[in-house]
Amino acid sequence: MSDSVKYLLSEKDLPKSWYNLAADLPEPLPPVLHPGTLKPIGPDDLAPLFPMSLIQQEVTTQRMIDIPKPVRDVYRQWRPSPLYRARRLEQALDTPARIYYKYEGVSPTGSHKPNTSVPQAYYNKEAGVKRLTTETGAGQWGSSLAFAGAHYGLEVKVFMVKVSYNHKPYRRFMMHAFGADVTASPSVETASGRAILEKDPDCLGSLGIAISEAVEIAAQRDDTKYSLGSVLNHVLLHQTVIGQEAIMQMEIAGDDPDIIVGCTGGGSNFAGIAFPFMGLHLRGGRKRRIIAVEPSACPSLTKGKLAYDFGDTAHLTPLVKMHTLGSTFVPPGFHAGGLRYHGMAPMVSHAAKLGLLEAVSFHQLECFAAGIQFAKAEGIIPAPEANHALRAGINEALRCKQEGKREVILINLSGHGHFDMQAYDDYFCGKLKDVAYDPKELAMALAGLPSVPAVA
Ligand SMILES: *Cc1c(COP(=O)(O)O)cnc(C)c1O
């Protein structure tokens, strides 16, 4: 039998523009609201946090947005990324399905995140910004922004969720290597951090708290802006290089995916692979099954409410309409740190509401089992986040086996797991358990959703 097959594009095939799903949506996105007035915000309201070029990308409905040449030049270091046919996995599963995966682990920090950290740093540099603040959970986003900051000579200050700061030091060292300043969150450096620590000195932190701290610092100084690694429209936009390349690569492979699968934390890698295919459908093409996969312990799309909510714990951010577990919801500890956010990208939530995607959730043990089966067959150890996408993809392949169907499955492999080997060891030692969120805590967090008058 033949080995895995790799479909490469040449540098000249690197996409020249990003694809904006907003151009093709049959119903426009609900407006973003000001946290004080609850009225729709204008571009100026966001100016303390983001440069105008990124704010324009946040609100535009233009279909294709040019990728600046200097950004494409940095992308070239690892893009176009490879697409593989997972033949050995197909054989191991004994499935008639054909499985492909797009591999984003080839970037300098090992995930899809530099696809947006690089343009974000570029536009900030162009606007004369000197310093960027951000938050990070396990460190994937912090290390990606640190990499981009080093490239453009920007200072980067990262608030890292304290439990990860203490227990996952290697990505912290990576941020240091790129010259970033890393602070454990909650910290005494901000009013929002101090308020949390007064109530609970041992607080282990959350993404919502770290976002509050990073936003607070950015709003204080003119030379400092804030950068977010997922959720926002412009972040999803930047990730669409993934799906645009995959469309070309699937054509070269002579196959057309029936099913497209991605894991969802804030929704950016999923949108990256899925939105360009969704756009083909909305412009009159074929409708494919598009599956968003989330952890059962932090299930915003499958168990959350589609409602206006804050992006952070201290309620400093604007209100966006999204599937949310409530901004005070703190998920139980599990090993896919990149999937531990209380909300979902508004554009992914909107697509779900319009019936353009399906959402499923899995527990971590079954996801690790899928990741190890994949690693044995394909030789790549996936990030724990990506294991969720693999679980769903493998389940679809097994369904095809039962039904005798030769469907084509495309999975986004968002990153490698080389910094997550402790989690794999915990799995092998039997220390890893499935964890459930506390339904009482979810009910409380949902009861605390802000009440918002109906908006036009
Ligand atoms: C951050 C991260 C995710 C989750 O973030 P999204 O915005 O949902 O893509 C998934 N996979 C990896 C490898 C990550 O680093």
Image (spheres, helix red, strand yellow):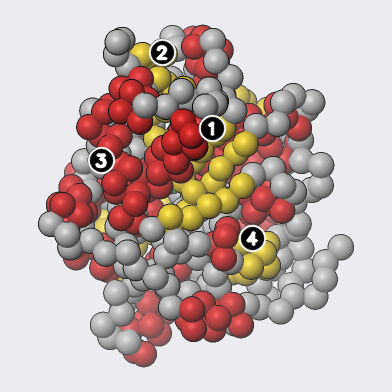
Label 1 crowd (10 A; few <14 / some 14-19 / many >=20): few
Disc nearer the start of the sequence (4/2)? 2
Front residue of this view, candidates 288 and 33: 288
Please tell me whether mark 3 sits on a helix, a strand or a loop: helix
Q: Residue at x 72, y 40 (%)?
A: 22
The quadrant of the image that shows the C terminus is: bottom right
Query: Which of the numbered marks, if any, corresponds to residue 322?
Result: 4
Three-letter code for the amino acid on which mark 4 is drawn: Met
Q: Residue at x 21, y 46 (%)?
A: 419
Disc nearer the start of the sequence (1/4)? 4
* Above or below, comparing residue 116 to residue 91 in the picture: below
Can residue 142 be seen?
no
Residue that numbered label 3 is attached to:
372
Please tell me whether mark 1 sits on a helix, a strand or a loop: helix
Please tell me whether mark 2 sits on a helix, a strand or a loop: loop
* Above or below, comparing residue 195 to residue 405 in the picture: below
> Residue 367's spot in the image, x, y percent?
35, 49
Residue that numbered label 2 is attached to:
8
* Camera-side mark, 4 or 3: 3
* Above or below, comparing residue 381 to residue 426 in the picture: above
Q: How far is disc 2 from disc 1 in space, using C-alphas? A: 32 Å
Q: Residue 389's image quarter?
A: top left
Can residue 433 be seen?
yes
The mark total stands at 4
> Residue 170's spot in the image, x, y percent?
18, 50
Disc nearer the start of the sequence (2/1)? 2
* Camera-side mark, 1 or 4: 1
Q: Residue at x 55, y 73 (%)?
A: 326
Q: Residue 182's image quarter?
A: bottom left
> Residue 83's spot in the image, x, y percent?
42, 21
